[in-house]
Amino acid sequence: MATPLELIKKKRAEAINRVISKGYLSTKRVYVGMATCEIAAGSKEAWDVFKTAIEQGLTNVYLSQKGCVGRCNLEPTVEVIENDRMPVKYGKVTAKRAQEIVERHLKKGEIITEWTI
Amino acid sequence: MNLDATKLSELDAFMAETAHKTNSHSYVIAVLHKAQQLFGYLPREAMDYIAHAMNIPTAHIWGVATFYHFFNLKPVGKHPVSVCMGTACYVKGAKLVLDAIKEELRITIGETTEDGIFTLQETRCIGACGLAPVMMVGDKIYGDITPKKAVKVLAQIRKETV
Amino acid sequence: MDTTTVNIIIDGKPYAARHGQTIMQAADEHGFHIPRLCYHPRLSIEGACRVCIVEVEGAKNYVASCAFPVSEGMKIHTNTQEIRRARRDIVELILDNHPDDCHTCERDSNCELQRLAASMGIRNRHFKGEKKHYEKDLSSASVIRDPNKCILCQRCLRICSEVQGVNALSHAFRGFQTVVMPAYNLPFAESVCSTCGQCINVCPTAAFVEKNCTQELFEKLNDPSIIKVVQVAPSVRAAIGEAFALEPGRNMEGQTAAALRRLGFDYVFDTQFSADLTIMEEASEFLERFQNKDRLPLITSCSSAWMKMMEQFHPDFIPNISSCKSPMVMMGTLVKTYFAEKMKIDPAKILSVGCMCCTAKKYEAERPELRVNNMAAVDMVITTRELAWMVKSAGIDFINIHPESFDLPLGLSSGGGAIFGVTGGVMESAIRTAYEMYTGETLVDIEIGALRGFSGIREGKITMDKDEIRVAVAHGLGNASELLDIVRKNPQRYHFIEIMGCPGGCIGGGGQPYAGVNSMPLDENILKKRAEALYSIDRAKTIRRSLDNPDVQRMYKEYLGSPLSQRAHDLLHTHYAPKLPQGILPIESTVK
Amino acid sequence: MAENTTGYRYYLTLCDGPTCMQKASRTMRETLERELARLHLSDKVRILVSGCLGMCQKGPILIVNPGYAMYGRLTEEAVVRIVEEHLFNNRPVLDFIIDEDHLFNKFYRVFGDVNFFGKQMRIALRNCGVIDPESIDDYLCVRGYEALAKVLSVMTPWEVIAEMKKSGLRGRGGAGFATGVKWELTAREKSDVKYVICNADEGDPGAFMDRSAIEGDPHTVIEGIIIGGYAVGARNGIIYIRAEYPLAIKRLERAIAAARAAGLLGQNILGTAFSFDIEIRLGAGAFVCGEETALMHSIEGHRGMPRPRPPYPSASGLFGKPTLINNVETWANVPVIILDGADWFATLGTKTSKGTKVFALAGRVNNTGLIEVPMGTTIRQIVFDIGGGVPDGRRFKAVQIGGPSGGCLPEQYLDTQIDYESLTQAGAFMGSGGMIVMDETSCMVNIARYFLEFTQDESCGKCTPCREGTKRMLEILTRITEGSGTAEDIVRLERLGALIKRASLCGLGQSAPNAVLSTLRHFREEYEEHIQHKRCRAGVCQAMLSYAITDACTGCGACRKACPVNAISGTQKTLHVIDQKACIKCNNCFVTCKFEAITKS
């Protein structure tokens, strides 16, 4: 019989596969902070913008929520991770800013430096 | 006052879930939470009902309900208004905001406006310290609030409600 | 019990303690009386007042000696300058939120807080500030609740829940706003309170007191147009001496009768007489049910706190309850009927006063179903405490007064009437009489040891002819509820049950004198002495069975006919009905 | 503050822990700087120095981001090659890369926010802001539940306890009782039923560590609790959490359900004989329920009032059964300790305090937020390096640590290290980790009053010193801030403070006077000023202020209109005047004036 360690390794492998099948290897991974504080600051609205964009055909983007990293005064925060590039973290991402991030960063690859943390 | 039968049966169902658990009496706080969720506050009739259903003396239920600040013993307005008095908010002037609201609504903490629209509450840190000072109306959080902004928001809500 | 010895050092000297003892228990045994306030030996440990703090070497903070267990080598300091000062500051803090009205307070000179403050030597007040302010609750017929006097020691709610099982009280709110109150802050009269008055007994201050009617009574005693009749319950004579600083257990029957006459009563009767009458009726009722195989067990009804509790908490037992009125009400009824007729007095002119060990009797006296010819059977009830105060107030030398007898025809009693005041006494009396009624023979061994003592529930057996009668006794309402649970599970287990609402029976009633300087309220040793006073009255009597009381016999012959006759039924029996709010009996450990 | 993350091509993190230092990490830095300059990379590469990364045996350590390449056992020659090949030619040097699968280090992969995060070290919060908290898959990907599997596969309960003891982990909720010892005491009790409780009743005003940890990574807490249950022989776990945290509750519920579905909770966990389950119980708004005996009373359905100890929960706790209680942060450390080892964990921090501590940094500081730093970090590093110092060019005055139970430390304590003993000695308290920075606009008397008002309001009312004493202290402080204090009031405060501290029943009462006592100790002159000169130097205590209008007034009339009591007069475009007698010091004019023409003194 499999030991718990063997079992958990199997579970991890399965989990990785599931995450990948959800599009984790997409070129751009977008993480939206969704803790109470972030939501209070408006991250739900930002999330909706990204979600809508994907539903409307934005491809190669993996959208996920995440907890609070602790940058209270800059919330809501959104992080964009691309392979081989320094991760970019945006602060105070309102719905409007989110829309621009979609247009400029996700679609055109431009890093909007004035909003980065 | 007669309690709404549908809500009561929902409460019954909730109590039935806890009844078979070990130490089932200990779920009284959870049941009170449920009752408040259903009735908006804890009517005496509801507490009485729970006391008899759970076989817990009424004085004890009363003692528990009055101990915890989360429980409302009086009906609450349509829009509960709370100002966060956590340290971050306090340092950034939450007290002034609270005073302005008190004056605007002509009620003090724990009271409900005559028209039943607002109930004023004081709350501990809600964890939105980055937005301090913070006011909550219902579930919605208003950050970086000033006395003036607060009054304006409330006026707007009142207009929409009436 | 763990008897391992633990060596401890108190104030620099070695002593032996037992494993599992608290510091306070160990210190008590060696002559250190650490000041205390919320502690009560009958109740759970709260550690709330912090008056009993001591220093323990190695502990960062002071420890509450009532709660902290001793351990090997423990070094305890009970009397350093620092700890004295800390205790003094704590008591001062209590005083700072307490009305400064000692001179006009009911508990003046009888107050544990006052004594404590005196022993602390508080001469200045440093921390004065806002005091709480609440309305007194005057709604109850028996007990007045004054939260302003409350120091939140929690004894009242502990006795109400842990000993009485009534749970009429709880803390409400918290912090500085904490108040002890009934559910929903409703008037006490609308609560499940049984009016037993044990909260008064254990309260260290005057947060609970009886509804005092001494001034009203004084006024009536001065009214020449009224015929003033009083009756005295058995337990009053066994305890009233304590209010005059006599040692507990002195029988003050004669002095009480004499003092009542000095106070202005025209007739002084003995509730023990009507106790004998109660036995005649109750024993007959029992035998009738037993022979007819009616509903059993029969449960006694003389304790009025128990009756109120029964109607609210145990209405399913109403068919089991003896229909006999309590001895006090039987007496009151006879005063306004038999006695009035005999003396050719207009009963409306009679003031019938009960002098009782009990606060619940005040409530009982107001029950509408107990009225007789549209008059109250008992117009007014005063407690032992109130009587003692009246005697003092009237300037009567209670201790040296020449003892006098009760008036006839309602003043002669058997020993069986006397022991009504102690738990088990009614049952013992009833058996003495029922045995003879049933078998036609006299019971030789008249003292029934199994029914005596203070354990919460006691059982006994007696064989009458060939029939075995199984009886049980419970005292304290908590034990009563426990006993009824046994009956619910096994209805055939007993034939006859005696229940008394207060610990120890009436001798521990809610109207008895406050504890003296060196004792705790409801101290079991004092209860034992009061009980012994009643047992010795019984032993001293030649007539020890109720049915041998010649005045009782005469009354049946002249007036009532026989026990359970129509007239007896009209005058001496009553009925019960479920009462609201319905009481809730929690299953163990749901209340703290 | 916004750091331009794209200005640098690489970020290097150089371990500066004592062992690495010894192993010449300082000379490494010099070499590094020299080599970078040689290849003209100095302005393209940013060097950060971190606290000990806990991999001392492989030190000195250098981490290159992005990409998270970790180089170990650095030599000068290695540094030269890393600069040339990796930083210049963009090709990692495989020879020196150490393959460390440490759990905590996940964090550095993601965050380029170096000023804020550079000095931090995330163990408890390692996954917060990194993974999707509502996905057990995400958690499994980062070695989630591997610690549990390890414990169940190769460790006996006693070995787990030994590991916890060896790690030196102490309770993160307050006084810092040794966690392993607590586990051992509970494990030793013989009982058919035992409980394991996670205290998530975080109630400090301005503290939200637990909420963040649960919202960001609920599975870590759950995994910790299960391991605790295994170690002490319990089958029942309870998470007691504030009802005010609906999202955290929801995430916990989801996480528990997911763990059950994955066979990680419930009967026969991971196919072993060990069964364990967790239920959530809600608090209802009572700060005192953070105290363990009060918390247990609350779970039992009673008023949350503490009781005297002993008996301790380990002997007689919830429902009278042996009970182990730890707080959220403590539990979150457990899986890391099991996987990365107690030896590693014990290298972090100071002699008496191991590992890291989470703080909620708030108040007058540029970067407010939630941080996790190694024990031993100084307050100065937190306030100035991580927090970015005091805004608006104001002067730092004090830092309040430990919430209502803690104390205020002045400037001269800035170099105090974060550990249990140092903080207590200085007059503060680790507490659950609130940290509030104050500048010259904060009045220390008012701050003390604020915290006391909180504890007074939250006092359960059971014991006399806390119930009555804090009320009197609050009255005295209120008088002082209102200008009617007397010299004896300070003596009274000290006398009451000492009494409440030593005579109260529970930790809430015992620590309630700390805010007052610490400010009296460090800022006594402010109290004296309030009393003797009726002066509040911070300009906070309204009663002592007087408002005046300066020449900067343009006569716009805005203040006149804002004044609720018509205390301001003046015609349009002329200097306005405040009637001092009528003024109620509401501050409205001060806020209203656009020209800074109103002063308060």
Image (spheres, coloured by chain):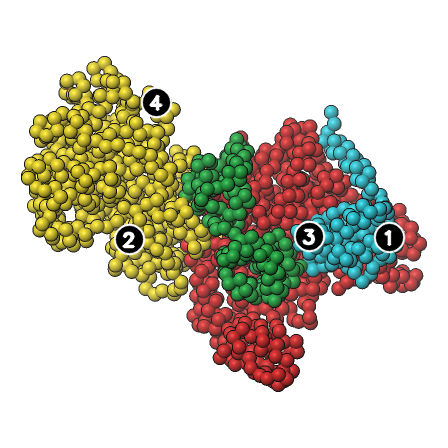
Chain under disc 3? A
Under tag 3, what secondary structure? helix
Quadrant of the image for the N terminus of chain C?
top left
**Chain drawn in green:** B
Q: Tell me if label 3 and label 4 are in contact, CB under 8 Å.
A: no
Say which residue appears at 43% left-offset and 70% top-offset.
D488
State the image coordinates of residue C165 (x, y, percent, origin top left).
Answer: 36, 37
Q: Is residue B108 left or right of residue C227?
A: right
Q: CA distance from mark 1 to mark 4?
A: 84 Å
Name the amino acid, label 1.
Lys
Under tag 4, what secondary structure? loop
Q: Tell me if label 3 and label 1 are in contact, CB under 8 Å.
A: no
In this picture, is C75 found above or below B109?
Answer: above
**Chain drawn in red:** D
Of circles 2 and 1, the one toward us is 1
Query: Looking at this rendering, what residue extends furthest in the front direction?
Result: B162
Give the label on residue A107, or none: 1
Marks 3 and 4: same chain?
no
Say which residue appears at 64% left-offset and 29% top-offset.
D267
State the image coordinates of residue C247 (x, y, percent, origin top left).
Answer: 19, 45
Give the residue number, with chain letter if any, for mark 4.
C491
User: Which badge, 3 or 1, comes first in the chain's sequence?
Assistant: 3
Name the amino acid, label 2.
Cys
Under tag 1, what secondary structure? helix
Q: Is residue D589 left or right of residue C401?
A: right
Query: Looking at this rendering, what residue extends furthest in the top direction?
Result: C466
Give the residue number, with chain letter if any, for mark 3.
A39
Q: Looking at the picture, tell me which residue is in the foreground, D38 or C252.
A: C252
